[in-house]
Image (spheres, helix red, strand yellow):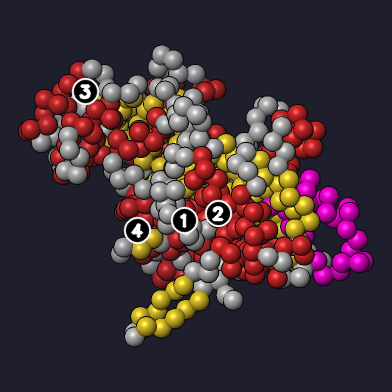
Amino acid sequence: MDTKKIKLKGDKVIEQIPSIKDKALRINLNENIYGTFAEIGAGQETVRHFFRAGGSSGTIAKAMSAYDKDFSDAVYGIEGDGRYVTESRLKKMLTFEGELIEERLSRVKHPNKLFFSYANTVATIDFAKQFKGHGWVGIRYQLDPEEAYNEIILHIRFKETDSRLQQETLGVLGVNLIYGAFYKYNDPKKLLRYLYDHLDKDQLEIDTINFSGPRFAEVDNRLMSLQLVKNGMTDAVMFNPEGKNILPAAILYKKNILAFRGSFRPVTKVNMDMYENSIKMFLEENKVEKENTQVIFEITLSNLRSDGEIDERDFMDRAELLCSLGQTVMISNFQEYYKVVEYFANYTKARMGLAMGVNNLVDIFDEKYYRHLSGGILEAFGKLFYRDMKVFLYPMLGEEKEVITSENLKVHPRMKELYKFFKFNGKVVDITDYDPTILEVFSREVLKMISQGKPGWEPMLPSGVAEIIKKQRLFGYDPDKVLQA
């Protein structure tokens, strides 16, 4: 029994997904796989499948649900923030249960056993149905008895509005995760896709995933983040300057947010000048405090596509540079700005800012982007500007080398009065402290110079960035081309 049975029908290849029962049974019939299930908050939904599949006595060492908070604290310890549905809680559960197996079972007697601990800590939908629920799910496991443990940890958000359905969804996901961990570990991208076997995207969202351990030493979790968005498993993912995937809710909750959208291909002096000036202006706003402000550099999925396909190497080059500059990066599938603001508004009611160039603002006032909305551009602008949000506008040079700002930019005649309304109400403010010597720096020109081996691009980038590009040969940099040029 393999993960995917393939049948041929004429010229078509039809993939048949093994049932959840078949997956659980295959795990149960593997005489070496042995471990514990600890499930908090949504019933013992995952282990139930293994009990029902048959042959589980050789697989399940223990199954438990530490529902009572005091009992849970007695087993796993007390969290510093007093919460239970957290990543740190999940990790404590996985580690505690894993060490317990090692402690209680002799390796001499069981030399070939592959120990695992599966855990989840989940809050399903509340009675008022205001919060749909979320949770952390993970597995800590061996693929060789002599080898260190691997870990796969993910965060989920429920989309269903019935707690029983959410429990069933969690059970299916748990089986898919355990099965994938043991039988698809050598292809993490496929493992990720197979998490949705027998599930639909409208049942469940996976917005964070991290792989670790010897078998995943070569896995870059930022690339796994990208797959989540690419596969439609979530709308946006985030990672920190250390390159670790982070939970958007944890970073954005009740924060003032200043966001920059761009291709950052590569990040230039213009990008950093915009950042430095807009953050200074943002922090001078009422109700904005430095310690409660989060800066986000956002790249849309459409910005990563090359000939319809996502260029992963190119994505990693950009991520590398932004992380080296100490920035938190968000990858999203939001084409329109109002969707970015709506997304942030899920987590905060505090003040928001968008920093952008004049050309981006002119684009926002183009009606063609809003034809799919019943209320057209007015609906989009209601969503974009009705919140406590402001645009910090970076100038650009016009065709006659004149500096274009919010005062003299040109939008479509039909949009002129709408633009004036937002400008008059202080929703659009100019960045006035900009560096006029760098207005002719464009990412696309720098990229062309790098890839063609032309000299002179280094001064257009922030300090240290050119060295990183050369050292790591990012964006097609080739020293041999430079020598020939």
- Closer to the chain start, of discs 3 and 4, is 4
Q: As rendered, which of 431 and 202 lies closer to the eye?
A: 202
Q: Is label 1 in contact with label 4 (beta carbons under 8 Å)?
A: no
Q: Which residue is mark 2?
A: 173
SS for callout 2: helix
Q: CA distance from mark 3 to mark 4?
A: 32 Å
The range drawn in magenta is 96-118
Viewer-nearest of discs 2 and 4 = 2
Q: CA distance from mark 2 to mark 1?
A: 8 Å
- Closer to the chain start, of discs 1 and 3, is 1
* Mark 4: amino acid: Arg
Q: Is residue 201 above or below residue 249?
A: below
* Mark 1: amino acid: Leu
Q: CA distance from mark 1 to mark 3?
A: 44 Å
Residue 134 percent across, percent down from the top left? 53, 39
Look at 18% across and 31% down and name the residue there: 378
Mark number, residue 456 = none
Q: Quadrant of the N terminus?
A: bottom right
Q: CA distance from mark 3 to mark 2?
A: 46 Å
